[in-house]
Amino acid sequence: MAMKLEAARLMVYHAAARAERGEKNLGFISSASKCFASDIAMEVTTDAVQLFGGAGYPRDFPVERMMRDAKITQIYEGTNQIQRMVMARALLK
């Protein structure tokens, strides 16, 4: 889980660094980093809930809240399916 989180974090940092440098055509890298990071967040939190077993599901346990937050990141700022369409358009240019 830590390995996947670090890969997602580095991808987001890379996209942010390119944006700060003022590079053009950031559609692919920004969509890819958002999509990848949100998918990894959902995957990792799902694994964490399973790791905790029944204790991972009650609302008072932090892992349950993290899983809800991870799910909303897949939807917020455009669903991941839309991000995949943006990436495909960028690759076909």
Image: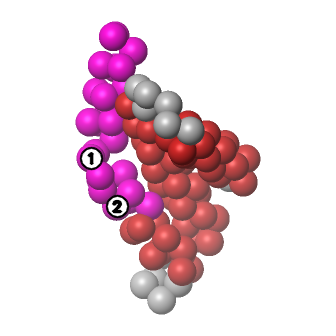
Task: Please give left or right for residue 12 compared with residue 69 in the image.
Answer: right
Query: Is 14 drawn above or below residue 85 in the view shown?
Result: below
Which residue is rendered at x = 49% and y = 37% of the image?
22
Looking at the picture, tell me which residue is in the foreground, 39 or 86.
86
Helix, strand or loop at label 1? It is: loop
Residue ranking furthest to the bottom: 60
Residue range (magenta): 70-93
Which residue is rendered at x = 39% and y = 15% of the image?
91
Helix, strand or loop at label 2? It is: helix
Circle 2 residues within 10 Å: few <14, some 14–19, many ≥20: some
Is the Cβ of the residue at disc 1 closer than 8 Å to that at disc 2? no
Which residue is rendered at x = 49% and y = 70% of the image?
66
The residue at which mark 1 appears reads as: 78
Circle 1 residues within 10 Å: few <14, some 14–19, many ≥20: few
State the mark number for residue 11. none
Residue 89 among those drawn in magenta? yes
Q: Please, what is the three-letter code of the amino acid marked with disc 2?
A: Ile
